[in-house]
């Protein structure tokens, strides 16, 4: 493997050693947000501290409102967004759950807020480690959901996120998920672009005829009965469908302006071209899987990774195209869905559903791992891949969901 | 194979228990002759608000299969019998949903029956009830509307009277003996109630209604927008600022042209513009912003917007300046102020006559003093469970200061 010893090439981007949370805060300053609300809960609180520091340092001018709880925190930004402010908010675990009522009303009101979910296990037991069930609460409600796995991706996707959410065709909230500890508290070298470039990429937030303002007198969220509700849901459905095209556009434009960023917005494909077994996961689980894949390939086992970024909208067609050529698929969930089909995790069931109409359906195995922030080990990855190879040989899906790394 | 579909049109809150009990009683009575049945209400939040027209339904059928066939809808599209528990509902029904104004007989089938409690004459009622392009029968039980409160039920036998009357209307489904047996077995059943049901059976008055008869008004209606025609974000345009009444004076607010709500009204304010002191209290207090400001500074209650709550009468400091009068005394929603301006003397004469008529100024709903329920109930029972008491007139008079 080539080793780079030269200093980084000169660029108009600054290179900073920052955590995922700090990277989000850098992006928020670049996006010149107007209103941010805060209420501390680990691991999300790292971003709220980073924003406060930006404001204290004079790098960002924004209203910083410390709410008395997550419910108010999300309610305040919802209202600020309706009067035209670019807003940011976030939480973790049960804090996110406490805000649930406000989270529910945000998509139908077409509020394009950006929220950082520092993924955290839900109480009980009280725990700080990562699980994805918190953000997944809102998967059916019209929130866009995106998982990131590096500080760089945190910064870039924050900028892309505002561009997508605030597009008039979409106007839906986006929850950006960052694995607690693994990303929120890990500092990595990150490129921070200059403001001029960001300004070229990210237009002003224009709420148009939905702006709550004396010059545009409207009533927001009146009571409605069965004579209106299904039409309102259908509008939300259409907005989420339109998000597909808008996301593609935003990533293409990001590459044009910044000269970097993925070709495929929806998921990262790692060594999938010739892979017989493809593992699927979200978030920082990518790191042990990638290392495991390199080790396995050294032993002649062709394994690849699909790391999902966008969970809502779900990239059904592209994912099916990427997976249906494999001999077996293994989905590793960092979440649970008790009592669901095959007692699988949420992602495994979504992938299964997406594959149902595929011409070719390889055997699909479901794994649950890394709950509560436990390390997903290289051995776990090996074990999962081996089981997938066995399924590939038999040609049969395994109806059991396998828990990796649980003491038994 | 046959089925009987009945709707019970009632006033929200005041009659919600009454309507539900009638619907139950229909099913339980029909069960006595081996029929299957279901009683249900259309669910909504708004019907449980004072006076809003709402509906319960009862379906009875010969077989379970036929019952299911009729149940597989949110609500029936046609009814054999339309029971109306307050004759002011004859002016039409605007429900909580945006359907426009629906004539009270809209769902009634050709040859069906509209069964109503009322003290008014058939011809008087047909001034309110819209024309229908199919003949039907109007059937009356002579009684005032039975109104109670949110958590109380007025046990005045209206429920069993309607069941006894229905046995006469639809004997193939409800026999009088079956009704009486069901009444005895039901909650709070008694022989006195059975007697009331039998009397209602005997006393039911009916009159065929021809297609030429009825209120010729075309009820207002509108098309609902498609999902892609609606504003996004659960937003609606604000009601625009209103305009002066005339010549730059007064103020008439813009109002929602699609959702008027006036069929919620059982009584309306009658205003003495000569004694009005222009204090604004009615205008400020009205929860529906129904008052238009007239060029002379008086206030005219707009009858397309008034829900008839009576708050204006309660807050008005002038004795007899605002008086609530039963809807049955009116045939239209015309402006009182315009009538007063046209001919002040004639208006005064009409006003004095109207507010002096105890029959129409008796409070039609609500309880006004502690012990009222017990007192009225006792009167009902002492009278043999047949007549219904008149209510308490003029209860606000003692609080007037001017």
Image (cartoon, coloured by chain):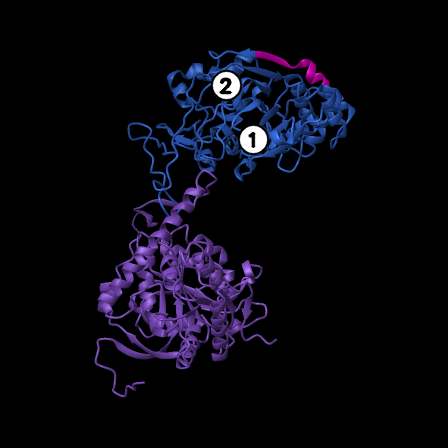
Residue that badge 2 annotates: B129
Residue in the foreground of this view, choosing between B88 and A370: A370
* Magenta span main SS: helix
Q: Are marks 2 and 1 in contact (CB under 8 Å)?
A: no
In the image, is residue A129 above or below residue A97? below
Classify 10 Å Cα crowding around label 2: few (below 14), some (14-19), many (20 and above). many
Residue that badge 1 annotates: B55
Instruction: Identify the chain of the residue marked 2, using the numbered disc in the image.
Output: B
Query: Residue shown at 65%/33% (left/top)?
Result: B369
Asked if residue B206 is among those painted magenta in the image, a careful observer would answer yes
In the image, is residue B177 above or below residue A139? above
As measured in the structure, the alpha-carbon distance from the residue carrying label 2 to the one carrying label 1 is 17 Å
Q: Is residue A254 visible?
A: yes
Q: Where is residue B350 drawn, in percent x and y?
A: 48, 16
Q: Where is residue B255 drawn, in percent x and y?
A: 38, 34
Chain B drawing hue: blue
Classify 10 Å Cα crowding around label 1: few (below 14), some (14-19), many (20 and above). many
Span shown in magenta? B198-207
Residue in the foreground of this view, choosing between A206 and A375: A375
B232 vs A395, left or right, is left
Asked if residue A65 is among those painted magenta in the image, a careful observer would answer no
Instruction: Identify the chain of the residue marked 1, using the numbered disc in the image.
Output: B
Q: Is residue A128 visible?
A: no
Considering every residue shown, the one lying at the far bottom of the view is A5
Element carrying mark 2? loop
Chain A drawing hue: purple
B279 vs B38, left or right, is left
**Mark with earlier residue (2, 1):** 1
Which of labels 2 and 1 is toward the front?
1
């Amino acid at each position: 493997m080539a080793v780079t010893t030269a200093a980084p090439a000169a660029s108009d981007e600054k290179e900073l050693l920052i955590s995922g949370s700090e990277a989000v805060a850098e992006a928020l300053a670049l996006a010149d947000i107007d209103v941010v609300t805060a209420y501390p809960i680990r691991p999300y609180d790292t971003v709220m501290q980073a924003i406060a520091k930006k404001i204290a340092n004079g790098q960002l001018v924004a209203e910083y409102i410390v709410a008395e709880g997550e419910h108010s925190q999300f309610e305040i930004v919802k209202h600020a967004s309706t009067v035209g402010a670019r807003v940011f908010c976030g939480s973790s675990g049960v804090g996110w759950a406490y805000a649930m009522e406000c989270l529910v009303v945000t998509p139908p009101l077409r509020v394009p807020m950006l929220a950082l979910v520092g993924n955290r296990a839900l109480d009980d037991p009280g725990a700080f480690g990562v699980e994805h069930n918190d953000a997944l609460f809102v998967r059916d409600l019209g929130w866009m959901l995106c998982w990131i796995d590096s500080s760089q991706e945190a910064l870039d996707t924050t900028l892309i996120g505002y561009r997508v959410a605030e597009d008039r065709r979409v106007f839906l909230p986006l929850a950006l998920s960052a694995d607690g500890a693994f990303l929120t508290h890990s500092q990595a070298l990150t490129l921070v672009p200059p403001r001029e470039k960001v300004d070229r990429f990210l237009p002003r937030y224009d709420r148009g005829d939905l702006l709550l303002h004396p010059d545009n007198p409207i009533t927001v969220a009146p009571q409605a009965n069965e004579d209106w509700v299904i039409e309102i849901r259908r509008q939300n459905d259409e907005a989420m469908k339109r998000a597909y095209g808008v996301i593609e556009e935003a990533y293409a434009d990001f590459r044009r302006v910044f000269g970097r960023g993925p070709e495929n917005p929806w998921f990262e494909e790692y060594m999938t071209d010739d892979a017989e077994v493809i593992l699927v996961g979200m978030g920082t689980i990518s790191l042990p899987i990638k290392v495991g894949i390199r080790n396995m390939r050294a032993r002649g086992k062709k394994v690849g990774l699909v790391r999902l970024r966008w969970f809502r909208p779900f990239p059904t067609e592209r994912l099916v195209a990427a997976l249906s050529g494999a001999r077996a698929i293994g989905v590793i969930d960092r979440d649970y869905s008790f009592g669901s089909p095959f007692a699988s995790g949420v992602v495994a069931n979504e992938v299964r559903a997406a594959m149902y109409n595929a011409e070719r359906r390889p055997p699909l195995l479901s794994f649950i791992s890394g709950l509560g922030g436990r390390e997903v080990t290289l051995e776990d990855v090996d074990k999962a891949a081996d089981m997938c190879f066995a399924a590939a040989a038999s040609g049969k899906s395994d109806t059991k969901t396998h828990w990796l790394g649980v003491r038994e | 194979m046959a089925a009987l579909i009945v709707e019970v049109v009632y006033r929200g809150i005041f009659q919600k228990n009454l309507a539900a009990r009638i619907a139950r009683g229909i099913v339980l009575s029909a069960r006595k002759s081996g029929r299957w049945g279901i009683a249900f209400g259309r669910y909504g939040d708004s019907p449980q608000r004072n006076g809003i027209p709402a509906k319960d339904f009862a379906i009875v059928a010969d077989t379970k299969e036929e019952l299911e066939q009729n149940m597989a809808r949110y609500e029936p599209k046609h009814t054999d019998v339309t029971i109306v528990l307050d004759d002011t509902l004859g002016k039409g029904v605007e429900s909580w949903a945006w359907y426009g104004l629906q004539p009270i007989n809209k769902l009634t089938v050709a040859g069906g029956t509209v069964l109503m409690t009322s003290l008014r004459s058939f011809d008087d009622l047909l001034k309110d009830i819209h024309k229908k392009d199919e003949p039907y029968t109007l059937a009356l039980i002579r009684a005032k509307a039975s109104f109670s409160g949110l958590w109380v039920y007025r046990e005045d036998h209206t429920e069993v009277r309607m069941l006894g009357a229905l046995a006469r209307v639809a004997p193939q489904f409800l026999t009088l003996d079956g009704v009486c047996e069901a009444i005895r077995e039901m909650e709070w059943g008694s022989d006195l109630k059975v007697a009331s049901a039998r009397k209602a059976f005997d006393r039911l008055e009916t009159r065929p209604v021809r297609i030429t008869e009825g209120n010729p008004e075309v009820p207002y209606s509108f098309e609902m927008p498609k999902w892609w025609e609606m504003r996004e974000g659960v937003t609606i345009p604000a009601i625009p600022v209103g305009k002066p009444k005339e010549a730059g004076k007064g103020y008439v607010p813009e109002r929602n042209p699609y959702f008027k709500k006036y069929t919620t009204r059982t009584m309306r304010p009658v205003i003495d513009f000569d004694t009005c002191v222009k204090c604004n209290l009615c205008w400020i207090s009205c929860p529906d912003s129904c008052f238009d400001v007239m060029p002379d500074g008086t206030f005219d209650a707009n009858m397309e917007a008034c829900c008839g709550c009576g708050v204006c009468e309660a807050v008005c400091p002038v004795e007899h300046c605002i008086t609530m009068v039963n809807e049955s005394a009116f045939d239209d929603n015309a402006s009182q102020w315009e009538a007063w301006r046209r001919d002040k003397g004639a208006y005064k004469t009409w006003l004095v006559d109207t507010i002096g008529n105890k029959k129409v100024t008796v409070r039609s709903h609500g309880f006004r003093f502690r012990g009222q329920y017990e007192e009225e109930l006792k009167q009902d029972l002492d009278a043999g469970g047949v007549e219904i008491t008149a209510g308490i007139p003029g209860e606000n008079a003692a609080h007037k200061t001017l």
